[in-house]
Image: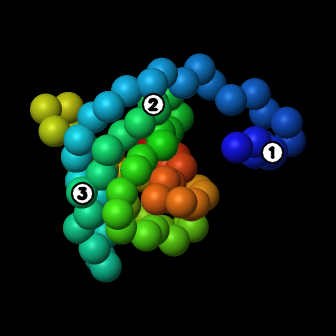
């Protein structure tokens, strides 16, 4: 799947991973699996459908938590951008 980035900003290096956790928001608590990871964000897989622009708190088992925003969704996957 090819995505255009804003102003042709190069994407950071992504690492394939398999980490279980949860995505929490005002509307849901979802089991997730992080399938790739970079310093700026990650790709998650879940049976729960997320909405673009949704704010979530990711809690990764044994790793901690981070606030994030859903940037794209499709076919059980979602792109996540970490926010400070």
In the rendered image, residue 38, in percent from the top left (x then y), is placed at 50, 28
Q: Which residue is mark 3?
A: 31
Q: Secondary structure at mark 2?
A: strand
Q: CA distance from mark 3 to mark 1?
A: 28 Å
Q: Earlier in the sequence, mark 1 or mark 2?
A: 1
Q: Nearer the viewer, mark 2 or mark 3?
A: 3
Q: CA distance from mark 1 to mark 2?
A: 18 Å
Quarter of the figure with the N terminus: top right
Residue at left offset 37%, top offset 27%: 17
What is the x, y in percent for residue 11? 68, 29
**Cα gap from disc 2 to disc 3, whole angstroms:** 17 Å
Q: Disc number at residue 37?
A: 2
Q: Which mark is residue 40?
A: none
Q: Is residue 57 visible?
A: no
Q: Which mark is residue 4?
A: 1
Q: Residue furthest left?
A: 62
Classify mark 3: helix, strand or loop.
strand
The answer to which image quadrant residue 49 occupies is bottom left
């Amino acid at each position: 799947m090819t995505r255009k980035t804003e102003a042709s900003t190069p994407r950071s290096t992504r690492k394939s991973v398999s980490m279980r956790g949860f995505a929490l928001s005002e509307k849901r608590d979802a089991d997730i699996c992080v399938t790739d990871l970079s310093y700026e964000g990650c790709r998650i897989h879940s049976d729960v459908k997320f909405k673009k622009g949704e704010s979530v708190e990711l809690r990764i088992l044994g790793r901690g938590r981070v606030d994030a925003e859903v940037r794209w969704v499709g076919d059980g996957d979602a792109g996540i951008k970490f926010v400070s």
